[in-house]
Image (spheres, grey):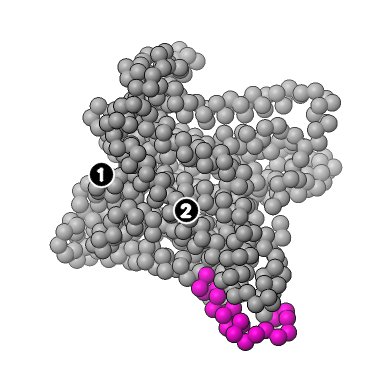
Amino acid sequence: MATQETLPAPTSTHTRPPRTRSTTATRAPYAFIAPFYVLFVLFMLVPILASVYLSLTSWVGLGTPEYVGLRNYGNLLTDSSFHKALVNTLIYVAVAVVVIVPVSLLLATALNARGLRARDAFRVVYFVPMVVSPIIVALIFSLVFDQNYGLANAALKAVFGVGSVDWLGQPTVAKVAISLVMLWRWSGYLTIFFLAGLQNVPKDLYEAASLDGAGWWRSFTSVTLPALKPVTAFVAVTSFISAAQIFDEPFLLTAGGPSDQTLSVAMFIYRAAFQRQQFGYAAAAGVVLFVVVFLVSQAFNRLLGIGRTK
Amino acid sequence: MSTTIHRPAPARTERRGPRPGRVLLYVALTALGLVFLAPLLWALSSSFKARGDIFSSPPQLLPGDPTLENYRNLLTTQPFWTWFGISVAVAVIATVVSVFVCAMAGFGFAKYEFRGKSVLFSLMFSSLSIPFAVILVPLFVLLVKAGLGNPWFALIVPWVAPAFGIFMMQQYIVQSIPDDVLEAARIDGCSELRTFLTIVLPLLRPSLGALAVWTFLQSYNSFLWPLVIITDTNQATLPLGLQTLFLSENRAYDLVLAGAVLATVPTILVFLLLRKQLLEGLAAGAVKG
């Protein structure tokens, strides 16, 4: 769509701009964006700096933080819980980017089928899980995944004749269960972006492709995918950021168990600070997460050209 | 916005009759829809079951003997309406303020050229990739030290300028507000603020709706931050209240399910009422950016 139109300098088009107007016009944009930056500094920048400071201290939440240099970071290196949290978080990220994003693209492609009826109804139904509060999702799924009385095992029993899977108690299966909940909750949401992207692909590109004798797969790879690159980039980066800081699902479904096998980094931070009063240690883990997430997503944005002012 | 182009050519499919591939597609899409809805419908159905029937083997799809007992118990034994009131009030205030702040900033970025614009924009945009977990601990410490750990400040003020909302607004304004409208207002002697309030805001209505639903849902459903900052049980939000029930030693599923249903009703209603704006508004920012 027409985003390349550049803005004319506001006062240059008519000949006699009143003097006062032009000075307010130059100040106005700063006034418009100021609230964001005030809040940004107070509630993001200051906390991040405070986090860096806290990460160099040992502090139980009372009294004065005691400076300990890089000791917290050293301890993170050897903390097996933190390693598990990192690996698990990496798995959640992989599930989000390698499974959920392609599934959403597939869903969107299906919904984009020509002349599909009730497209909007499907779109709305698939989106509904995103509207429901995570705590409610978690408590519903803890029922669904209940070993003896749950819907998941009942369905397995009905279809395959066997089904007493310990969904939330067995390390590998618990990760699968959490991934399924992520899939259930996120795919309809991400589909929206892909579907809008698909509907923006100029129709004549497809016609040209089919005139050239390209089949469905060929036109998908040579027309659809390149056209979807910006949307895919946006969706992939957003999913990466959300999965990297996942908290609600593992916290509420498994509380990180069994034995930290579903613990995420965000949960590790929460637990260190608010259950063990190791504020400095929690801050150090936060800084690590921040550095990784920020650098990776900035690299992606740079690489894929997301978020330019135009 | 361009949503009308995908109109199908209806004659074609009807003339040929339903092709097998098409039937399969509908079956698959409907089955998927059921997968998305089944857990929610099962929870809805279970909320009307007697306490003993919630856990039964095999699971009952429909309550054998539907009862309102769970709802009655919830509302008489738990301060459900207090939680509900706090959640709704916080979410409504946060939504109103945040929609306004985002529209303003989006307008500033979309319709003005000024020094430092691209740096400021990148700064704003990069704040999208700051994980909340890094802010969690220090923000908690700072707000508690400042005595601002109450829901009315802590759950609202830090969250009223989401970069995502500003980005969405900026995209929408670039596409839908023509420069000559603003130019005309300036010639008529409107101040910049008045132009924004009386001319730009009304034109933004569809995307304001989208942003409003999104912000409302984010605030109403947020869990981790309230979990950390709200220590007084009398100020619990709905998710916190439900979590307390959920964690209580007997896992009060009967009460929790009734609460979950009541808590979800407003979100589903808001979503269904404004679904079109929300889905299109969300997509517009990403697709056309």
The chain ID associated with circle 1 is: B
- Whether residue A162 is visible, yes or no, is no
Quadrant occupied by the C terminus of chain A: bottom right
Spatial separation of the CA atoms under disc 1 and disc 2? 24 Å
Point out which mark residue B95 bears. 2
On the picture, is B89 further left or further right than B122?
left
Quadrant occupied by the N terminus of chain A: bottom right
Residue A122 figure quarter: top right
> A307 above or below B248?
below
- Whether residue A239 is visible, yes or no, is yes
Q: Is residue A19 magenta?
A: yes
On the picture, is B274 further left or further right than A55?
right
Judged from the image, the secondary structure of the residue bearing numbered disc 1 is helix
- Between residue B208 and residue A81, name the one nearer to us: B208
Query: Percent x, y for residue A261?
Result: 32, 37
Which residue is under mark 1?
B233
Query: Percent x, y for residue A66?
Result: 17, 64
Q: Which residues are magenta?
A: A12-32
Instruction: Kindly identify the residue that appears in the image at 61 percent across and 37 percent down.
Output: A123
> B186 above or below A17?
above
> A207 above or below B254?
below
